Structure formats: structure tokens, C-alpha cells
Image (cartoon, rainbow, N blue to C red):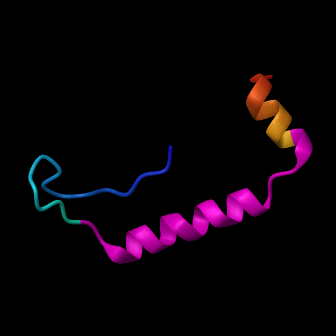
Amino acid sequence: MISVCGRYIHTHQTMFSIADFDAAREMLIQVLKGLDESTIKTIIEGK
């Protein structure tokens, strides 16, 4: 799971840093670009 830390998460006004969001997004993009068939198979099969 990828997540971004937030403040006041149990209210209607959750706050988080846009920079943290952008960094998490870029990290996820780079991880997905690096996946190959073998890695995906390992993730799916859990081995």
C-alpha cells in the first residue's frame, strides 16, 4: 500500500502536503516502470 501522511484524518478537512503526494506518485510510477514479467509473477504467486 502506498499512502501519504495526513493531519486531521477523522474530520472533513484532512490536510496533507502536496509535495508528499507528488513524491509518492513519482515513486509509484518508477516502481511500476521497473516491473518485469518475472516480478509480476512472483507478486501474484507470492513466492
Farthest residue, direction right: 38
Left or right of 1 in this view: 33: right
Q: Examine the image and state in which quarter residue 44 appears.
A: top right
User: Left or right of 32: which side holds 8?
Assistant: left
Instruction: Choose top left, top right, bottom left or bottom right for residue 7.
Output: bottom left
> Is residue 35 highlighted in magenta?
yes
All told, the count of numbered labels is: 0
Q: Position of residue 16 (x, y in %)?
A: 26, 66
Taking the view exactly as shown, the residue that stands out farthest to the front is 12
Q: At x 80% / y 59%, what residue is drawn?
A: 34
The percent coordinates of residue 35 (x first, y second) are: 80, 52
Left or right of 31 on screen, residue 36: right
Question: Residue at the spot x=77%, y=63% of the render?
Answer: 33
21 horizontally vs 33: left or right: left
**Which of these two is toward me, 47 or 45?**
45
Q: Does the magenta portion include 27?
A: yes
Image quadrant holding the C terminus, namely top right
Residue extent of the magenta highlight: 16-38
Image x and y of residue 1, in percent: 50, 43
* Relative to 23, residue 34 above or below: above
